[in-house]
Image (cartoon, rainbow, N blue to C red):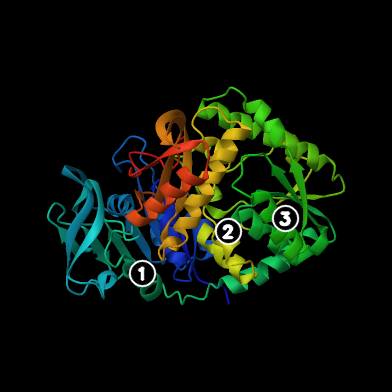
Amino acid sequence: MQQKWIAILDFGSQYTQLLAQRIRAQQVYSEILRCDTPAEVLRERKPAGIILSGGANGVSAKDALTCDPAVFELGVPVLGICYGMQLMTKMLGGTVTSGAEEEYGFSRVAAVQGARLLTGNTLDFDVWMSLGDRVETLPLGFAVSARSLECPIAAMRDEARNFYALQFHPEATYTQNGDKILRNFVSSVCGCTGDWQLTAWADESVEALKRQIGDERVILGLSGGVDSVVAAVLLHKAIGDRLQCIFVDNGLLRFNEVKQVEERLRAKLGINVHIVPAAERFYAALKGVTDPEQKRQIIRREFSEVFADEARKFGNCKFLAQGTIYSDISDGVCLTKDPAKVVHAIGLPDEVKANFELVEPLRDLFKDEVRAVGRVLGIDNELIDRQPFSWPGLAIRISGEVTAENVQLLQQADIRVKEEMRKLSTYKNIWKCFAILLPVTSLGIRDYKRTYERVCVVRCVDNADGRAVDWTRVPSDTLNRISCRIVNEVPGINRVLFDITSKPPATVEWE
């Protein structure tokens, strides 16, 4: 029997990936597709339901995105969210106007008694609203499901045809009982039973890799991060010693990272790891460079060249594996985005990839699902729960010139931040915590003498919904221990600051 799944047509919402993740968290497979996906393609693939995502523009705009009108003739339940609600209204004969008053952020809506999608929620509840255009008159056959002070039609339904729409975002963390609303659509309306299991996915993936690779060999670019490690273990489970991992030590890694990769992958798991010592090459290329974008360009170029040189040494390998995950793929799906400009990792030169067939075992999974598969495969939690680490590494946490001395100084400060933060019971809820080295000196006192040493910034952030990021409320005694340890144990730093800026307006990284 074919597994039931949900198709999400992407109109450019910043929450589209989060929406897919929320549905998958209910053990129902969801997939993000272009908004102009032909209805005939959907008919062939037989989704149990279709969701029209939000979007950045109004439906009356000159370049407004639309979907195949036949989507509404497939006999499949459809849920429109935000822009998707307005588009559904326009395509089915209702009217949409520009709101006299825009409404963004928290709002309170009142649900209509008996609205199927809102069953199990309170009659009044908080939502995350995104309202510029609004539904003025309902399409024939629709009824109002919820209202807000500024939006008389905040939700609507045509239960005879199983068409539903919400002006607010149920996938946003800030919407009260948003998961319950999505569950009502996915389970009650679409009949999905929650049978998508990552344990079964891992077993099926191993078998699929065996079929794809056969008796050939595979090269994998290993970064030491969660994605590449899980990809390596999955491939090793499928083909054993015919997997060869290449790990480039660029000198910009976290403290002791090379040793940890060696111990955990090579020693504990028996995976072939070829470590390329290239730190001096990267430091030489970065000498005197202070512009953040130039740093990125240099690191990308040097990595590509080093990896290409090493890959050519394994000329008998047919396949090249990458730790590509679903967010890397789906971020370029929407018509409003240029896939060529969506960059998540260091790209390999075309002349290298041209010599291999590509293997991407994790391309269907989001980050949290990759972690879950890692646990299924028996990878230890310390590796699986590692915090995200941007591909330029410590280079973008060193404001100013990147040198071996600055890297070592930052590594020592950074490891002390993590050691103290790990003592907190809430550590797993922290998305990132790290140190930043500033290119300024500060007056201090050490051994009754004046010192002019470097300044370190501590950055800790929580990631509520994949987009908005808030700074972590770290206990003052923890901050005190971090500061004392850094200034007392790391020669060269005599002042520690704590960053209390959220994203937006700031970014998580400083460069």
Q: Which residue is mark 1?
A: 185
Mark number for residue 364?
A: 2
Q: Which residue is mark 3?
A: 262
Mark number for residue 474?
A: none
Which sits in the foreground, 84 or 310?
310
User: Between disc 3 and disc 2, whose residue precedes?
Assistant: 3
User: Between disc 2 and disc 1, whose residue precedes?
Assistant: 1
Q: Residue 379 location in percent, x, y?
A: 64, 66
Which sits in the foreground, 278 or 423?
423
Q: Considering only vertical position in the picture, is 118 above or below 151?
A: below
Dot 3, how many residues are within 10 Å of its Cα: few (below 14), some (14-19), or many (20+)?
many
Residue drawn at x 60%, y 60% is 383
Residue at the top extreme, as displayed = 288
Kind of residue at disc 1: Phe
> Relative to 385, is 99 on the left or the right?
left
User: Please, what secondary structure does the residue beneath circle 1 have?
Assistant: helix
The picture quadrant where one finds residue 118 is bottom left
Can residue 61 be seen at all in this image of the molecule? yes
Kind of residue at disc 3: Glu
Q: Residue 47 location in percent, x, y?
A: 49, 65
> Relative to 35, is 301 on the left or the right?
right
Q: Considering only vertical position in the picture, is 491 above or below 5?
A: above
